[in-house]
Image (cartoon, rainbow, N blue to C red):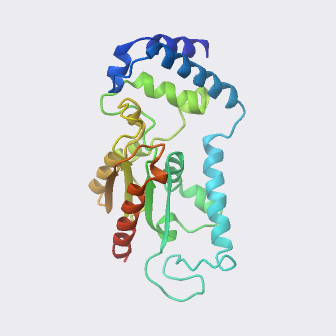
Amino acid sequence: LLARLLLAGALLGGSSAWFELCGRDVGGGEAFGTILATLVLLVHIGGRGCASFGDMQGDVMDAIQFMVANRERLGLEFQIGGETAGGKGGGRPRLILGGYSSGGHVCATIVRRPDLWGDRLLPPPSDLAGAMLYVSPVLATRARGGKPAWFTDEVVRMVFGRRAAASVPSPLHEVLDGGDGHPDVPHVLVGCRNEVFGLTLMDTFFASEEYSDALDKLGIDSRYRSVESDHWSVLGSSALGDALGEELDALRSRMG
């Protein structure tokens, strides 16, 4: 922890080279370095004993299991496979799975884990979901695009812990490695023009366009949409509302 604090302070404490590396000359590096070092300390203190990535996956799977088991009581008439909740025949499933930010990361990993679905006696995601929708998701936890691996690895270790970091999946790299078992359903990925205020070094973790391209190469229907916003404010932006309206209309025909 001390080494990380010293590293953050050394890199950001008045170093304009750091900001050039990030893609923006911000200025005020000494103050920014102090703030970042404080945030690193708070993350380490606050993160002790918190939920693991496996816990996050389990929580999402439990929520899906509850929704499927109680869909009639909840008034949800989505289709599973070729049947509706009432047992009548239907077309493709109409349920859309996805998420924002780390929720997108979790969703992109559970759809590639058939054991999580089988353990809960759930149909595979390709039968349950008619489409996948991600908004500014975290899809890469390993370095890409020439970005320094030490930075990516350090952020992942800081968030998930040093021991657990190595086991945190990187959805983009899994798809690039072949994508076996990935749900063959339409995908929509909405990314931000400037994910982290133009700090391109942090854009390493947001890989919506690359992920969409990789799915296309596997023959999976995928569409990428960029909006004028950033990761932190996109959910409240009118640009996202307009984009989702158009993409959801288009998804109806793509889902069949």
Q: Is residue 215 visible?
A: no
x and y percentages locating residue 4 in the rendered image: 55, 16
Taking the spot 41% from the left edge, 43% from the top edge, the residue there is 230
Quadrant that contains the N terminus: top right
Residue 233 makes an appearance in the image: yes
- The mark total stands at 0
Q: Outermost residue toward the left?
A: 217
Q: Position of residue 8 (x, y in %)?
A: 50, 16
> 170 or 29, which lies in front?
29
Q: Position of residue 46 (x, y in %)?
A: 69, 30
Q: Residue at x 37, y 70 (%)?
A: 251
Q: Residue visible at 39% across and 18% down?
A: 27
Q: Is residue 44 above or below residue 4?
A: below
Horizontal side, residue 115 vs residue 183: left or right: right
Question: Residue drawn 34% across and 15% down?
Answer: 17
User: In the image, is 79 to the left or to the right of 203?
Assistant: right
Q: Nearer the viewer, residue 201 or 221?
A: 201
Question: Residue 75 falls in which quadrant of the image?
Answer: bottom right
User: The C terminus appears in which quarter of the rendering?
Assistant: bottom left
Q: Is residue 86 left or right of residue 11?
A: right
Residue extending farthest right: 49
Q: Position of residue 111 (x, y in %)?
A: 50, 57
Query: Residue 131, relative to residue 253: is it above or below?
Result: above
- In which image quadrant can residue 38 be found? top right
